[in-house]
Amino acid sequence: MAKQDEAEAVAAVIDRLAKKFPDTPRNQVEAIVSEEYTALNDGPIRDYVPVLIERAAKLRLRS
């Protein structure tokens, strides 16, 4: 996945999660997504990074 495509996908993840968790401040959603992105940033395969970020962030936001 190209860096630009990945950045757009991560931005879309933030938008979806902000809508799904409206009681959570957007900056908190962004911080969680950023932390999850950082945790996966060293992986050589980039195609699934947005999906993995969204799944991990959702779990954190639910708890």
Image: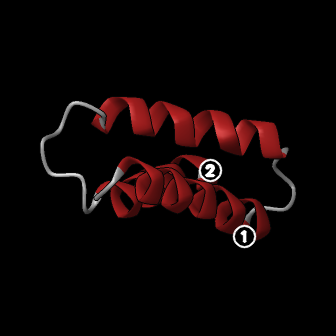
Q: Is residue 2 left or right of residue 58?
A: left
The disc label shown at residue 45, or none: none
**Which residue is at the front of the view, 63 or 61?**
61
Q: Quadrant of residue 37?
A: top left
Residue at 74% from the left image edge and 37% from the top image edge: 28
Residue 42 x, y percent position in the rendering: 21, 30
Residue type at mark 2 is: Leu
Q: Which residue position is annotated with label 2? A: 61
Q: Which residue position is annotated with label 1? A: 20
Q: Of label 1 and label 2, which has the lower sequence position?
A: 1
User: Where the N terminus falls, by quadrant?
Assistant: bottom left
Residue at 65% from the left image edge and 55% from the top image edge: 14
Residue 61 x, y percent position in the rendering: 62, 50
Residue type at mark 1 is: Lys
Q: Which residue ends up furthest to the left in the rendered image?
A: 44
One can see residue 40 in this view: yes
